[in-house]
Image (cartoon, rainbow, N blue to C red):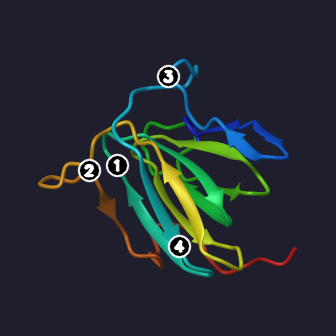
Amino acid sequence: MIHGAIVTPLRVMADERGRLMEMYRSDDPNFLRFGQLYMTTAYPGVVKAWHYHKKQVDNFIVVHGMMKVVLFDPREDSPTKGEVNEFFLGVYNTVRLTIPNLVYHGFKCISEREAICINVPSELYDYKNPDEFRLPVGTPEIPYNWARVDR
């Protein structure tokens, strides 16, 4: 797994009234700091990629549908430089994915309906100077093909 990426299983408590799932707590051993909380979505088959942050650490939790989240490690000093990881997050895999700074990431909705991702980044978004650096989806700099793979 890419150095610094963390997959944390989340416990869903369900009864006849509904469900409750704690997503992120300040007493979690991996808690860094709270920047803000936001929701992002993707429609079926849509890919949103690639970007990284110089300072920000992301914490993705998919609460509706399913997403394939992909990481690529370009960091020169990383023991996992050049590695690509795929993660499947959502209603069938309730986890929190912590994405380290300086690691490219993106996601694709793989469910039949819109997928909803909650992110709890470590930094507040700076509208005047965003901590976001992008490459196009099909860049040759990242060895990844977003097409579905039937195994």
Going from the N terminus, do you reach mark 2 or mark 1 first? Answer: 1
Disc 1/disc 4 C-alpha distance (Å): 20 Å
What residue would you read off at disc 1? 53
Tell me which residue sits at (46%, 69%) in the image: 49
Q: Nearer the viewer's eye, disc 2 or disc 3?
A: 3
Three-letter amino acid code at the position of disc 3 = Ser
> What type is the residue that disc 2 sits on?
Asp
**Label 2–label 1 contact, CB within 8 A:** yes
Q: CA distance from mark 2 to mark 3?
A: 23 Å
User: What is the x, y in percent for residue 58?
Assistant: 46, 44
Residue pointed to by mark 2: 131
Find out whether the residues at labels 2 and 3 contact each other: C-beta distance under 8 Å.
no
Packing grade of label 4 (10 A; few <14, some 14-19, many >=20) is: many
The residue drawn where x is 17% and y is 55% is 127
Q: CA distance from mark 2 to mark 1?
A: 5 Å
Can residue 84 be seen in the rendering of this structure? no
Helix, strand or loop at mark 1? loop
Q: Position of residue 91 (x, y in %)?
A: 74, 57
Q: Residue under label 4, please give it.
A: 42
Q: Which mark is residue 26?
A: 3
